[in-house]
Amino acid sequence: MARTTSSVPTPPGGTATAKRLNGIVLLVEDEPSVRSVMRRMMELRGLTVLAAEGPDEALRFAEARRIDILLTDIQLPGMNGPEVARRVRALQPGLKVVFISGYPREETAAAMQEAVDSAEFLQKPFTPAHLGELLGRLLESAPPEDTMTTPVPNKSGDTQRLPPGGDGPTS
């Protein structure tokens, strides 16, 4: 099932064929201005963006809600992006991961490969069109939403399944 839908107005730096995307992206970026701009880029394409300023907040989001794509900076305070990806994927196996960095891919490849078995890399700076194209491709290859649920411990420590959107346990 394709998750891209209707055309939307072209975002700045985008193309005339920009497609509206449907999905949930967990963005982990410690630089407030970069986080704000990236969030806006994705929201203009129709995505729901959970913006975390650091690893701890990202893990809380991942424990509480299903995510389609993790988009994380490689260099973060306290825990690097590859470690965040490893921990989030432990909570949500099969999650699509995109690492972003101002450093060349060659300098970060070893850390990325150690953390997760497959991931994309997007080097800063990038255009809204490039980001949208990458996220659209990943969402197209994601399993249908109705087959994805996320295990989440409840107050008693038992595990419940949250449906897409995380609104409550499934029956």
Image: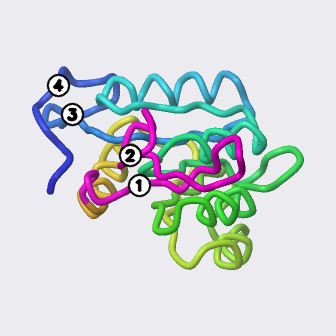
Q: Quadrant for the N terminus, please.
A: bottom left
Alpha carbon of mark 2 to alpha carbon of mark 1: how far?
Answer: 5 Å
Front tag of 4 and 2:
2
Mark 4 or 2 closer to N-term? Answer: 4
Residue placed under numbered mark 4 in the picture: 8
Residue type at mark 1?
Thr
Viewer-closest of 117 and 67: 67
Q: Tell me if label 3 and label 4 are in contact, CB under 8 Å.
A: yes
Residue type at mark 3?
Arg
Mark 4 packing: few (<14 Cα in 10 Å), some, or many (20+)? Answer: some
Residue placed under numbered mark 1 in the picture: 149
* On screen, residue 60 above or below 108: above
Residue type at mark 4?
Val
Residue placed under numbered mark 3 in the picture: 20
Residue placed under numbered mark 2 in the picture: 163
Mark 2 or 3 closer to N-term? Answer: 3
Mark 1 packing: few (<14 Cα in 10 Å), some, or many (20+)? Answer: many
Q: Tell me if label 2 and label 1 are in contact, CB under 8 Å.
A: yes
Task: Please tell me which residue is depicted at 83% across the width and 53% down the height of the picture.
Answer: 79
* On screen, residue 48 above or below 115: above
Was residue 166 drawn as part of the magenta stretch in this picture?
yes
